[in-house]
Image: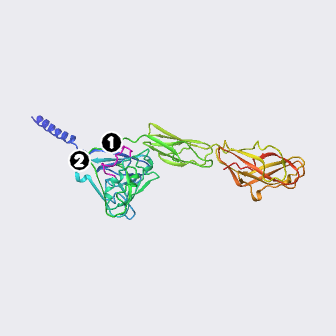
Amino acid sequence: MKMNIKTSLFLTILGLLLIVVVSPSSTDAAVLFSQSVLLKPGWNIVSTPRVLESYEFSAPETSANFDIFVLDASKPSGWATMADLGQSKFTPLYGYFIKNKTGVNQTLTFNYRVDVPPNERLFQRTFTATGWYSLGVANPSYAKPRGGSVTDTNNVDPILNSLLGTFSYYGTVVDFTDARFSTEPDSLALTDPWKATVRSPDVANTTEINKLNDFRETKGYAIYIKQANSLYSGFQNNDTPIPSPPEPFAADIKANDSDVPITIPHGSSATINWSSTEASSCSITPTGWMGLIGSQTTGVLTGSQTYTLTCTDGTNFVGDSVTVNLPPPASLTVSVASTPVSQTVVSGINAFTFAKIQYDGLNSGEDLRVTAQALTYTTAAAFDLDNINTCQVFDGSIALNIGGNVVNFSSNAFGADSDSKAHSFDNHLIIPKGTIKVVDVKCNISSSNHKLLTGWNCCFGRYCDSSW
């Protein structure tokens, strides 16, 4: 009989214990769904579109891993911490600058409350002083959800509508993530260049403000408040948001912000930028640069170079590459044109065209500058080279050697003669790459009663500078 009493009592206690174990706590019932956002290394700007039950980082929330600040013009420094604002959780309508100091991607998970009472689903924030503030977006009627379309709906003005009165109470609005929008519209990472737009004081004029990309949930923005005690409002629905798609495992590398091959001049360098999502480590060959995101300068290149980015998530690999090309080297061929031919001429002629010099830059990868040219003048028998004077090289109607650089001959023996002269160009001769230019060599012939037979050679080594 005693055994039966004990057994019955044990079963009763066990039944009570089972009831306690399977009953959910009130806290568990309040958290029905979550949303995670990616924090890239460096600064990110974040907001929550809903009331939170809690939040959590993928790494310990310590000052060694994260810094969190809010732009707040009412504070002496212009900045505030969450503690300064009396906040223990991220709050709708606030924009939070979060610096991920871990050097790798981290996630921030928002655990949203459900069954939020109507009065707690209406949000209002007062900007007590003029100046800069960071704000978030909580307006499901207009704001784009994460993963939403990139088609612009001009939602900025209606979202900020509560900041309008007889004139606009705000001026400049800054989107810190604009540079990544075309490839990562939901990215929270601050990326240069930022995009700033000044709203017209005329409340009916929305042209400028709507040049910003649509405001998106979980992003933050900066705004300049012109009217103290302006009110900014928002709200949330009590529905379950559509989960945002996971961040893609991807790698991207650019040269001078270009995904396609670029060509840079000789003696210059390029900037290589790279980024990744959902990767644990990345490296670039052949340089050995490391990091999930970064920027490096190539230095002066001596030849074309391809840079390959390889990233891993610990199991899989993904890559991207970009090429920096150098143009073909400077190349110049100098020759005497076939016309005019060697000939007999009557003395006493001025600006007689003795020859045409051809500069061939068809195979050059760069524009060319010629600063001087050596020419050899040869006369026939029984003629004195001293009778040739005022020799100049002409590019069309422009004399290249002028003043003291005009060539004259003296102290040459009578009869067949040859002399080489350097023609220094006061007006440098420019040959655009891929072209041919022909110049005229003109001299005056004295009126002495002699005939002249001309023949030509051309030197283009020492006196010809074919580099730009």
Q: Is residue 290 left or right of residue 362?
A: left
Residue 124 is situated, as x and y percent measured from the top left of the image, at 29, 57
Find disc 1 in the rendering and name its residue: 243
Assign the N terminus to one quadrant of the image: top left
User: Left or right: where does residue 156 sit relative to residue 331?
Assistant: left
- Which structural element holds mark 1? loop
Q: Position of residue 38 (x, y in %)?
A: 39, 46
Where is residue 25, by image quadrant?
top left
| Residue to which mark 2 is pinned | 115
* Residue 68 seen in render: no
Q: Is residue 437 found inside the magenta-colored segment of the image?
A: no
Q: Which residues are magenta?
A: 137-151
Q: In the rendered view, would you say 176 is above or below 277?
A: below
Whether residue 423 is situated above or below residue 313 in the rendered picture: below
Q: Are marks 1 and 2 in contact (CB under 8 Å)?
A: no
What amino acid is at disc 2?
Asp
Identify the main secondary structure in magenta: loop
Q: In the depicted view, which residue is nearer to us: 258 or 425?
A: 425
Element type at marker 2?
Answer: loop
For residue 339, which numbered disc appears in the image?
Answer: none
Which residue does the image show at 72% across and 54% down from the upper left?
A: 400
